[in-house]
Image (spheres, rainbow, N blue to C red):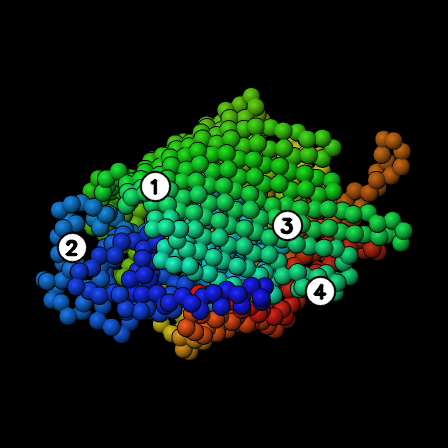
């Protein structure tokens, strides 16, 4: 890797520094905007060696800060002008008049959708994280209402829902297990991300298929000006990113990551584990613009984890246990602008998720075709409509493979209406899910509204979400690749989630927000006592109970988003419980991931353009687990005795809370051909003994033993961007 980096640096030393105009072309590709400026503005001069990975406004500041160029946003258009112009003579003034007559994109509503949290590459830059690897999914647990299933992991619980209830999309393709390293690292590389849209309450009508949240990750196109790239070496992963143009209308982006094998081998050896572990992922994207109105893209992702265990129990035999899992996706899309008020998109996607271990196999293949349109009849409405059809092939296997095919057809329409201080959004999603011997019809109405006055915003929302696939967890603590995904059947109905929310926010030097919400869930699944669904794959319906769930909460956040010192304090108070007729006599019991209090404090300070330090402190109440009071011996029909646990109730034991402090620093050094970046830090700086896992110990007496693995870990990484 070091030799490869040296060769790249040598080759790049022959490349001239890009001009300001070339940087503007890059920003047009990255953020999908159009720059408008007078012909007398000269952008042919040299620009900085590299643009920072931040939002569009931050990139423009790095280009023009201290000069006489200022900018104004008008929807998708960015107007560049000299500061010396009078308002009447300014390009922005004349541009507004032209657009008002033409009714094109600048007239379109640009208000964000209710309940949406939007993240960009700059939001992943400095927060201290586990072993120094910036991660999209781990960044989300800093937001109120979102919790990790286990410390340091990427499995998410959103507002009392199941981890399998999160609709995670990569370029519009749903994923089943978007993680590496048994859930400690997601497949999303922040250096590739264009934007992340997160909906934890109200869903727009165009989303369907899950009942808890939406995490929509869209990767960016490659740079269109010249060759760019990044080489990175860290404690966990090594990576190589290359992007650039192919001709004048085509761009390519290729990114690869592999696990840092030296560290992994050392950790496995220290744990006295006779095992080998490896993972890789590869992402490639090509984009071609036939014209300003037509754009096509194709993207491929392939990632695979592999672990080999070599137990040697008697010193003579060596039985190898093999486990691997991975995801392969392929997505193709066509964007077409029919007129200034109508845009169309057509997509075709394929997804293959495969898990193999010694006694279990799960093979899922999805194929989906979809079409969407966005219509702006005037400056007050934004109408979306579309639909699609999908096929899902499930082939779980224990002793024998049992393959089933299910299909779904969906249609939706939604309208966002803006009038003065009011913004109203209404939508309806209709879905038909076709399984063996049954067709489930699932109408899903969605409604939200917002009123803005001065610095205040008030919002309310209500909606129904339906989930036609269930993830039967193989672990109560971790989100594992062996979680069994099964579709609804003739006898088991889709899960539904009805949620209402009400909130307010104030925006000034600080932003303050508060929101209350309530969620009712029906047709949720839970294992019956002493049952493991993934062992009896062919008869999993006999091993689960169907019940209801209820969750409610309060979320409060105070943030300082701008300035040299930024940060956020958030607090979540939530309660989640479940009830099943076949469990605990139909009594309500706490949900396993019901963690009542969640505090997060983040602070970052930029000393100079080259040095930024940050700190993160978090506190999370403990969840619940089932602990037997005693064991009962029963006589088996064939003779002999079997020990069965006797429980006082489901999830009758409250686990202790977890808390930690993470600190980190980012150093940047600009050189002629690029930027060096060093990240250092400490995870869990005061070595809190947080329980990453718990086991019931029956040796002599029944007790719970906690396991702590993430204590006082260093973070170190280096990258070079050119």
Residue at the spot of label 1: 335
Calculate the distance from the C-alpha at mark 4 to the C-alpha at mark 3: 18 Å
Name the residue beneath numbered marker 4: 266
Identify residue for label 3.
305
- Is there any visible trace of residue 353 in the rendered image? yes
Residue 192, numbered label: none
Closer to the chain start, of discs 1 and 3, is 3
The C terminus, quarter of image: bottom left
Does 429 sit left or right of 80 as displayed? right
Element type at marker 3?
Answer: strand
The answer for how far apart the CA atoms under marks 4 and 2 are is 62 Å
546 to the left or right of 264 = left
Tell me residue 689's x, y (percent).
66, 67
Element under label 1? strand
Residue at left offset 48%, top offset 53%:
254
Quarter of the picture containing the N terminus is bottom right
Mark 1 or mark 4: whose residue is earlier in sequence: 4
């Amino acid at each position: 890797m070091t030799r490869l980096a040296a060769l790249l640096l040598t080759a790049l030393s022959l490349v001239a520094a890009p001009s300001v105009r070339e940087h503007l072309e890059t920003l047009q590709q990255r953020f999908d905007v159009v720059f408008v400026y007078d012909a007398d503005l000269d952008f042919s001069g040299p620009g900085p060696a590299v643009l920072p990975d931040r939002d569009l406004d931050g990139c423009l500041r790095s280009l023009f800060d201290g000069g006489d160029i200022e900018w104004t946003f008008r929807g998708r258009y960015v107007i560049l002008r000299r500061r010396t112009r009078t308002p009447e003579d300014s390009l922005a003034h004349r541009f507004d008049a032209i657009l008002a007559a033409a009714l094109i994109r600048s007239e379109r509503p640009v208000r964000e959708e209710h309940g949406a949290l939007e993240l960009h590459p700059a939001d992943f830059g400095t927060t201290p994280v586990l072993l120094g690897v910036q991660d999209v999914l781990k960044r989300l647990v800093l937001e109120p209402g979102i919790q990790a299933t286990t410390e340091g992991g990427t499995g998410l619980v959103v507002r009392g829902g199941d981890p399998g209830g999160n609709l995670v999309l990569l370029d519009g393709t749903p994923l089943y297990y978007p993680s590496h390293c048994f859930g400690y690292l997601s497949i999303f590389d922040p250096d590739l991300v264009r934007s992340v849209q997160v909906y934890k309450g109200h869903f727009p009508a165009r989303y369907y298929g899950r009942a808890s949240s939406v995490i929509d990750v869209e990767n960016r196109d490659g740079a269109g000006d010249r060759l760019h790239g990044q080489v990175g070496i860290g404690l966990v992963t090594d990576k190589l990113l290359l992007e650039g143009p192919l001709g004048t209308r085509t761009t390519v982006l290729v990114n690869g990551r592999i696990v840092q094998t030296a560290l992994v081998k050392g950790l496995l050896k220290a744990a006295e584990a006779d095992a080998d572990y490896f993972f890789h992922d590869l992402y490639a994207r090509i984009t071609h613009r036939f014209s300003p109105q037509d754009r096509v893209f194709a993207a491929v992702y392939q990632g695979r984890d592999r672990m080999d265990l070599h137990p040697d129990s008697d010193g003579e035999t060596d039985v190898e246990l093999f486990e691997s899992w991975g995801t392969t996706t392929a997505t193709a899309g066509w964007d077409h602008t029919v007129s200034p008020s109508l845009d169309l998109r057509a997509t075709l996607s394929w997804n293959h998720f495969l898990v193999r271990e010694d006694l279990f196999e799960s093979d899922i293949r999805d194929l989906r075709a979809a079409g969407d349109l966005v219509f702006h009849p005037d400056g007050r409405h934004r109408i979306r409509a579309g639909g699609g059809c999908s096929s899902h092939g499930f082939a779980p296997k224990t002793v024998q493979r049992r393959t089933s095919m299910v299909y779904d057809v969906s249609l939706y329409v939604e309208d966002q209406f803006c009038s003065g201080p009011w913004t109203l959004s209404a939508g309806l999603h209709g879905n038909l899910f076709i399984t063996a011997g049954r067709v489930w019809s699932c109408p899903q109405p969605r409604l939200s509204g917002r009123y803005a006055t001065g610095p205040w915003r008030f919002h309310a929302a209500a909606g129904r979400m339906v989930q036609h696939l269930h993830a039967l967890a193989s672990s109560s603590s971790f989100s594992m690749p062996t979680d069994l995904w099964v579709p609804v059947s003739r006898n088991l109905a889709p899960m539904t989630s009805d949620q209402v929310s009400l909130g307010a926010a104030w925006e000034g030097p600080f932003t303050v927000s508060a929101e209350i919400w309530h969620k009712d869930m029906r047709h949720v699944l839970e294992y019956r006592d002493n049952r493991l669904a993934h062992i009896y794959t062919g008869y999993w319906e006999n091993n689960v109970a169907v019940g209801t769930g209820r969750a409610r909460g309060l979320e409060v956040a105070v943030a300082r988003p701008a300035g040299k010192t930024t940060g956020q304090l958030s607090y979540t108070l939530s309660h989640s419980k479940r009830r099943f007729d076949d469990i605990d006599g139909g009594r309500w019991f706490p949900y396993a991931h019901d963690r009542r209090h969640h505090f997060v404090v983040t602070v970052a300070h930029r000393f100079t353009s080259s040095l930024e330090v940050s700190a993160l402190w978090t506190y999370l109440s403990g969840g619940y687990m089932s602990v037997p009071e005693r064991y009962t011996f029963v006589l088996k029909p064939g003779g002999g005795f079997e020990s069965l646990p006797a429980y006082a109730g489901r999830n009758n034991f409250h686990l202790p809370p977890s808390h930690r402090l993470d600190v980190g620093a980012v150093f940047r050094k600009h050189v002629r051909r690029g930027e060096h970046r060093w990240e250092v830090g400490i995870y869990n700086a005061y070595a809190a003994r947080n329980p990453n896992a718990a086991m019931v110990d029956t040796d002599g007496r029944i007790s719970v033993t906690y396991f702590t693995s993430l204590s006082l870990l260093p973070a170190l990484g280096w990258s070079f961007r050119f």
